[in-house]
Image (spheres, helix red, strand yellow):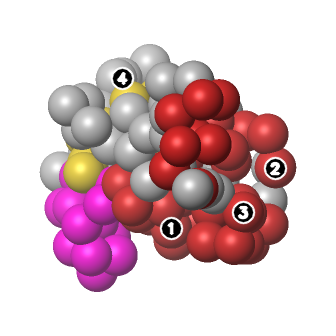
Amino acid sequence: MSEDIRIYVADLAAYNAGHLHGTWVDATQELEAIQAQVDAMLAASPVQGSEEYAIHDYEGFDGYPLGEYEGLQTAHEIACFIEDYPDFGGTLLAHCNDLEQARKAAEEDYCGCYSSLADYAQELT
């Protein structure tokens, strides 16, 4: 996948005070690294004592509608799934709307990507 899988995490206290303050984070990196970047963003807030954040934007999720309050761990797990299955991960997640169901489908039901039914049949024989 040529596009990075990333999230824009916004500082809610700053947002509510009329400031746009947040950071883009690679959602496929380790969860601890994601949390560290969010913590650093909150510490640098223009509003004293910022603690709350939300995902206000995202890129590279290939059709999966990531929610604003999805949570960093969930966003990370979804991003890693899409990274593991770049040809169809986001679309499959959007269809299943459940990460475990999508994992099962990808591991047990996916037979590959073929240009035509004839190409698939030829591969089987």
Front label number (2 vs 3): 3
- Any part of residue 20 in sight: yes
Q: Name the residue under label 4.
A: 19
The C terminus lies in quadrant: bottom right
What's drawn in magenta, residue-wise?
27-41
Front label number (4 vs 2): 2
Front label number (3 vs 4): 3
The residue most toward the front is 125
Q: How far apart are marks 3 and 4 (CA)?
A: 47 Å
Q: Mark 2 points at which residue?
A: 96
**Residue 53: x and y, percent?**
49, 51
Q: Distance between the residues labelled 1 and 4?
A: 29 Å
The residue most toward the bottom is 32
Which numbered circle lies on residue 77? 1
Type of secondary structure dominating the magenta stretch: helix
Front label number (2 vs 1): 2
Q: Quick one: label 1 or label 4, which is nearer the N terminus?
A: 4
Q: Distance between the residues labelled 2 and 3?
A: 13 Å
Q: Which residue is drawn at 30% across and 60% down?
A: 28
Q: Which of 107 and 61 is in front in this view?
A: 107
Q: Quick one: label 3 or label 1, which is nearer the N terminus?
A: 1
Given contact means CB atoms under 8 Å apart, are the residues at marks 2 and 3 in contact?
A: no
Q: Nearer the viewer, residue 4 or 26?
A: 4
* Kind of residue sitting beneath label 3: Asp
Q: Which of 31 and 44 is in front in this view?
A: 31
Q: Which residue is drawn at 62% across and 43% down?
A: 121
Which numbered circle lies on residue 109? 3
Front label number (1 vs 4): 1
